[in-house]
Image (tube, rainbow, N blue to C red):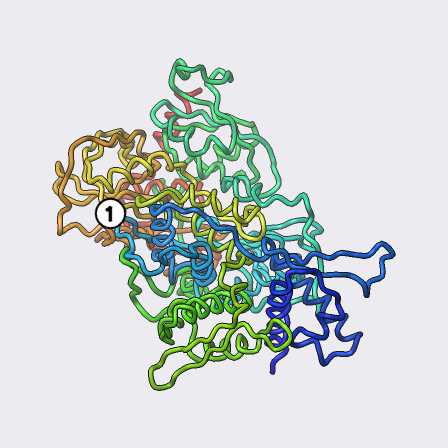
């Protein structure tokens, strides 16, 4: 029998023994009565028992130790309080259960933590109709979720997750984008962060003697443990992962100064709502806004920055509605980058140096493949484009066995066999794994030959027949969520947020955290909020979707830099690369339209109802531009990217050619010039349109407007 299996039998038998005895017991009694310990000598027992206690403690299963006054270790008494093993009942409403089920239906196959999420839902909904069997929602569709992004990334994520859980130092080769080099890293992994569609590792870098952030997609090769020790480090008590999750793109690194950005009245509301948390919002005279706002409607946004290029990129993306006004060194770089944009979109575009042009190599294709999930789930939850993905994070087998025991005990007490196929589906097991788990549970005992259950597969009926023992009631209540299950559950809630009409995930989250006694997001995984704060708008639109009521939208059309009032039929909330959208039918324009929630200044639910149109498919665009960022169009722009930024282009764009000086040519599909212009402006002078000519002229005109706006602000 494998050592891991022996350990699981010991640990489960120890728990069942302590729960059945319901009194403090000595180490001598444990060694005598608990399966797996009886054949050990005293030294071996002491080592194994200590290791098992430590591992159970890391699983949040805390044994109570009572020491005698004289401190003799052999006289210590051990017990397990029910509240240290069982999960307190959680009084979910039917809407909250529906919301949790919808979260799994949406994320299954697209969420790196989908399997532990499935086990967690089994535990927290104990005694209620299983949300896993409920009809799923069709009012939410996901284009971008938390898939690890391919086999290699999944393997790295699983290894890092285990290392965080076990406090193990890891070593790996890492590609540093800024220096364009691969070097070996030794890291104490503290936390995982999911932000902008990517997983990041937060940890103490031994080479830098400081906490650093590593993007998992830039790790090369395998992740390995640095030592064979059981534990290598303890995470500092003052480490706060929230500080890293609540940063803007320009704040990832050591602070270099405070940028001052003047924002026009037209978009001041948008900057204040969505970016205000990254700094300070003032009136243009430097005073805080009064209750009725600022006199001229404009705002001064002061925000700390670490990357000058990133903050400049953000300001340029706002077009003529924003002006960078300080500090002087940042303003100087801003003006240089605007000059580069103007120069590179003048009479002569960037020219290829002498030498052979190289076609893009396999590196860009590999990066694109890693960034793309391998399959897709529709709003109805059915998987498309291939078989089920191999799970990125597998739940601990301990959690699986405890959940399986509860399912089997329930079936046995009801006097009903349970189908092998049903159990395999509920726990996402192969039949071979299920049979192995049954063999383990069949030898877990309470001491003295009293077992938890006996289960075997009837080969004729393909059903599991169960005979539960009298003391099996210790396992017929839900166990506490293990760390990875708790993280999976709350991460799923944070990922979807307030975008499920059927129920409130926020209220469900509060109940779960209260039952656990801690917030799992502080223990290994943090889901960063999206850039825009659209929660209030999402709640209003969700109500309208459920009630089938028309909504009136005060909408900012960024491409045309103007506001418009729209009255539409809302069908579904859908996420994409740039944020969340409401998929709607616009009667005035007689067609489906998607409105980004962070551009809705105000939403009003009307009293007018509508009948859903059968021809409207709100999830139709999920596999298109929502996922790729590229709208269907007949035009393609060829864009030059400077040698300094070529590495980033290879990672994020479709590279078609490389020049001998290191510059690359990428192709961007576009439907409107405004979108293309904004993308080029955000490259802050490191990109230039080569063709078509009207696109070059559009960028040149936009730069001229920027300079006019700068002068007007001054």
Quarter of the C terminus within the rendering: top left
Residue 154 position, x and y percent, is: 48, 65
Q: Is residue 356 visible?
A: no
Decide: is 502 above or below 58.
above
Residue 575 position, x and y percent, is: 34, 48
434 or 683, nearer to the observer: 434
Quadrant of residue 534 in the image?
Answer: top left
Tell me what residue is drawn at x 65 percent, y 49 percent.
Answer: 211
Residue 360 position, x and y percent, is: 41, 64
Q: Classify residue 339 as left or right of residue 61.
A: left
Quadrant of residue 672 in the image?
Answer: top left
- For label 1, the residue is 671
Q: Classify residue 140 as left or right of residue 259.
A: left
Instruction: Say what secondary structure mark 1 lies in.
Output: loop
- The number of numbered badges drawn on the structure is 1
274 or 396, nearer to the observer: 396
Tell me what residue is drawn at x 51 percent, y 46 percent.
Answer: 513
């Amino acid at each position: 029998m494998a050592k891991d299996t022996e350990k699981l039998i010991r640990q489960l038998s120890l728990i069942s023994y302590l729960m059945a005895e319901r009194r403090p017991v000595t180490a001598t009694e444990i060694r005598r009565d608990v399966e797996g310990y009886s054949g050990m000598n005293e030294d071996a027992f002491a080592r194994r028992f200590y290791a098992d206690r430590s591992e159970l403690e890391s699983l949040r299963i805390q044994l109570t130790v009572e020491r005698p006054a004289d401190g003799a270790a052999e006289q210590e008494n051990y017990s397990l309080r029910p509240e240290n093993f069982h999960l307190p009942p959680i009084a979910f409403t039917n809407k909250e259960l529906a919301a949790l089920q919808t979260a799994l239906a949406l994320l299954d196959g697209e969420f790196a933590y989908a399997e532990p999420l499935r086990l967690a839902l089994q535990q927290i909904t104990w005694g209620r109709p299983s949300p896993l069997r409920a009809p799923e929602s069709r009012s939410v569709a996901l284009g971008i979720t938390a898939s690890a992004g391919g086999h290699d990334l999944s393997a790295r994520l699983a290894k890092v997750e285990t290392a965080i859980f076990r406090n193990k130092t890891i070593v790996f080769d890492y590609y540093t984008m800024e220096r364009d080099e691969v070097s070996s890293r030794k890291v104490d992994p503290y936390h995982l962060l999911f932000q902008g569609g990517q997983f990041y590792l937060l940890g103490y870098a031994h080479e830098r003697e400081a906490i650093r952030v590593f993007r998992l997609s830039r790790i090369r090769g395998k992740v390995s443990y640095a030592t064979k020790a059981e534990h290598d480090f303890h995470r500092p008590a003052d480490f706060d992962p929230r500080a890293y999750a609540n940063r803007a793109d320009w704040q990832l690194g050591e602070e270099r100064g405070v940028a001052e950005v003047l924002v026009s009245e037209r978009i001041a509301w948008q900057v204040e709502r969505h970016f205000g948390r990254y700094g300070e919002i003032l009136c243009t005279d430097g005073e805080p806004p009064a209750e009725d706002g600022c006199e001229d409607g404009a705002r001064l946004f002061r925000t700390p920055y670490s990357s000058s290029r990133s903050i400049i990129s953000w300001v340029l993306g706002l077009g003529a509605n924003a002006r960078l006004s300080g500090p002087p060194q940042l303003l100087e770089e801003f003006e240089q980058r605007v000059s580069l944009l103007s120069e590179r979109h003048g009479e002569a575009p960037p020219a290829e140096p002498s030498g052979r042009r190289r076609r893009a190599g396999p590196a860009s294709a590999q990066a694109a493949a890693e960034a793309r999930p391998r399959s897709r789930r529709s709003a109805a939850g059915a998987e498309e484009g291939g078989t089920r993905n191999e799970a990125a994070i597998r739940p601990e087998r301990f959690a699986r066995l405890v959940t399986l025991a509860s399912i089997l005990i329930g079936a046995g007490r009801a006097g009903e066999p349970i189908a092998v196929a049903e159990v395999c589906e509920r726990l996402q097991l192969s039949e071979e794994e299920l049979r192995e788990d049954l063999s383990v549970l069949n030898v877990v005992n309470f001491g003295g030959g009293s077992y938890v259950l006996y289960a075997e597969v009837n080969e004729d009926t393909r059903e599991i027949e169960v005979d539960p023992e009298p003391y099996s009631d210790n396992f017929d209540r839900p166990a506490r969520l293990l760390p990875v299950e708790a993280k999976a559950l709350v991460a799923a809630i944070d990922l979807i947020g307030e975008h499920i009409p059927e129920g409130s995930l926020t209220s469900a989250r509060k109940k779960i955290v209260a039952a656990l006694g801690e917030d799992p997001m502080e223990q290994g995984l943090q889901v960063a909020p999206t850039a825009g704060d659209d929660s209030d708008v999402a709640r209003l639109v969700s109500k309208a979707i459920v009630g089938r009521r028309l909504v009136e939208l005060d909408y900012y059309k960024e491409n045309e830099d103007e506001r418009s009032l729209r009255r539409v039929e809302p069908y579904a909330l859908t996420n994409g690369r740039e944020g969340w959208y409401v998929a709607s039918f616009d009667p005035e324009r007689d067609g489906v339209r998607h409105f980004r929630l962070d551009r809705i200044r105000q939403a009003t639910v009307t009293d007018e109802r509508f009948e859903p149109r059968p021809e409207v498919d709100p999830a139709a665009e999920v596999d298109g531009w929502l996922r790729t960022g590229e709208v269907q169009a007949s035009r393609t722009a060829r864009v030059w990217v400077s040698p300094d930024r070529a590495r980033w282009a290879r990672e994020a764009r479709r590279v078609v050619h490389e020049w001998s000086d290191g510059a690359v040519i990428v192709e961007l599909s576009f439907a409107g010039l405004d979108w293309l212009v904004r993308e080029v402006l955000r490259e802050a002078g490191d990109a230039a349109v080569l063709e078509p000519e009207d696109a070059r002229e559009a960028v040149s005109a936009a730069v001229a407007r920027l300079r006019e706006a700068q002068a007007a602000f001054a």
